[in-house]
Image (spheres, coloured by chain):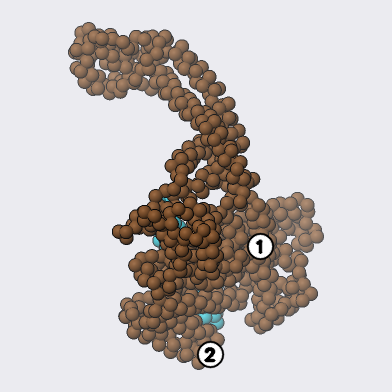
Amino acid sequence: MLRPVKMSRVVVAGSKDVITPVVEKLHELHLLHIVNYNGSEPSFELGKPIGKAKEYSEDLIKLRSVTRYLDLKNKAPDKTYPESQILSEMDNLLNNVGADITATFERITVIDADVKTKRDQIRSLTPLAVLPLPLEAYYGYDSLATFVGTVATPVEADVAKVSSANEVFSGSAKNATFVAVFVPAEKASEVSSVLSEHGFSETSVPRLEGSVDSAIAALESSIKSLEGEKAPLQKKLVDAKKQYEDLMLATDEYLSMQTAKTEAPLRFAETANAFVIDGYVPSDQFSRLKSELESAAGGKLEVQMISDKEADELVEKGEDIPTKMDNPSLVKPYELITRLFAIPEYKEFDPSLLIFVFFPIMFGMILGDVGYGVMSLLVLIMLKKKFRTPGWQQLINIVMIASVWSIIFGFFFGEIFGPLGLWGRIMGHLPEHEIELAKEAGLYFGEGVFGTLGRIGPLGIFPLDRLATNAVLLLIGTSIFIGVIHCSVGSILGIKTELYYGEKKHAYFERLPVMLFQIFFSVALLGLVMGQSVLTYLGIIVVVVSIVMMVIGPEGPMGLAHVPSYVSNLISYLRLLAIGLASVGLAYAANQLAFYVIMPMLSGGATNSEEFTIPAIIVGIMILVVVHFINFLLGILSPFMHPLRLHYVEMFTKFYSAHGGGVEYSPFGHVRRFLKA
Amino acid sequence: MAVVADAGTLYGLLAVGAGLATGLAGIGAGVGEQGIGAAVVGVVAEEPGFLGKGLFLMLLPETLIIFGLAVSLILMFAWTPFSGIVTP
């Protein structure tokens, strides 16, 4: 479980006659992680595609462009199709339906472009209305130059200076003066420089006819008719999407499968008459792979397992052994968190199981509320039906398990939507005089009780009110304690990993001292708190020893630079307490506000809950709902992010990143989703 | 020795100190995360596989605020020199 599945390096060699059935069988078995042949051996060439590879990929491109027009996204299948149905409908789908959709989409694009040009024309025509000219007067001259645009100051006099023959029209619009200047063509450049002195900025005049107003009206009516044409076309696309979505995704899947099969030989090594496939297979599946392949090839094939020694040599040359994480189904979702960080290398540990153990406990300890836990469980059950892609399902499962833990911790902490809220009303409180007694003895951990059971646990600490001073101190200790265990487990894995790679010095003088330092640093602290000087001295001695070991170790005195970070690693676990306190604080404030401020105030100073008036109760409940909802949203997010950080930063660094990321086991083959097997 | 301040003032000063410790540490952590966060978003936009590592880097400065918090907790709950005269 903590180790990836054991892999065997295999070589499949066979006659080219049987390459098609062998590829077919490999694809069906979904077992062999193929190592691509890189063409390095002179006697072997790269393989060539078999069968109708070209046709399949062309069809796939055609289909993908249609699915893009329909804006199809990958989704969970609503129904599945047998391959025969895909084959019989594919031609129609690609050529008739596809062509229709393409034509429709292209028409919509043309309409959109048309509408846009017409809108632009309207925009440039509108200001021309102030000039008394029909549109055809602006263009079509051989010997005249035309300037139309805005100017900052009047231009007539200056234009007349450079060109005595001229015609200038001007009119003022909202915040600019529009002019149309007509001069002989040979004077154009001089007039142009005169105009620019007056801040001239040119407007392009569309080549239309008639008066400006009638041109605008014509454009607007044609925009309207284009948009009228577009609406049914868009509806047609939406309908086509509804009708063909699953079929198209199924066809996509079929074509992708066929392309993968026909192009698979590109990853093989070939001679004139034979082919060789290199790859990895889980060791316990080797005999199945061998017998299935040999029967598919009718004896014209040989499957061999390479000895571990030879395989190690290949690894040294740069081949990656694929990692297949091996976890029971309850732990599987937590592989998501591992994967988000990095795929472990084949020889490293797969920490998913540890995340499964620690992550939900940390989440529960932070959130720790029966009410919030039940609420998030209900919300997640609803989301689980809605988001059915594997990634979402994993995420939802992670938080669901964590929510169960927060309900459990909710019972320890005596919280249902915060302390002082429902818990006290359901289970009751300690009587006043017992609270006083506990406070005097310095043993006050809260006033809640477990119904008739009263308070339980050593010194009666449960249910623990997290806001009480004693409880805060206790939780500080607990957080650091969890941190020591968490980091130590990480260090142990680090030591074992280094030993597995055969680096004893790194194991005993780099990883081990860290563990000793962290454990005995906290022992020393414990001794200080409990007043046991024996523990303190023991702790300090071992801490010094571990620092000496670090200096002897491979990093030398530079290793000392890491010491502060080992202390801060432990302090970092205080967030388990701190973030919990923040959300308890908010919940507490909400309950105080509703039950002890708003409700009594609106009931005219009533102190007994039976005297509260109905409006007061309604307002109070509204405040409770709003504040608890906000707190709930925050309360799901931070208990997720912070344990994540504790794993990534505090734990994984102890063993993980030492040797870089691995390659995930991805066997040749396909998991059918839209296609029936 | 003359009385410098009464117990209430001392307790108030402790609370102000605790608040400053957490608050300033929070600002520090925020400033630290700002730059890293922007860079991580840039990297993830190009290469989504770096999300985990980016998150890891982005969460590093978060420890700062926990230091501030630890100081606050010590001030509020475990500070003994005034315990004789300071009662909340």
Q: In the depicted view, which residue is nearer to us: A364 or A79?
A: A79
Residue A575 visible, this angle: no
- SS class, disc 2: loop
Q: In the depicted view, which residue is nearer to us: A17 or A514?
A: A17
Q: Of the numbered discs in the image, which one, if any, rests on residue A531?
A: none
Q: What color is chain A drawn in?
A: brown
Residue A156 on image: x %, y %:
26, 13
Determine the residue positioned at 56% across, 33% down: A92
Residue A610 on image: x %, y %:
80, 60
Q: Which residue is mark 2?
A: A532
Q: Specify whether disc 1 shares its chain with disc 2.
A: yes
Determine the residue positioned at 48% across, 68% down: A7
Q: What color is chain B drawn in?
A: cyan
Question: Could you tell me the amino acid type at mark 2?
Answer: Gln
Residue found at the very far top of the displayed protein: A165
Q: Which residue is mark 1?
A: A373
Question: Could you tell me the amino acid type at mark 1?
Answer: Gly
Tell me if residue A87 comes above or below residue A307 in the rendering: above
Along the horizontal axis of the image, is A668 left or right of A273?
A: right
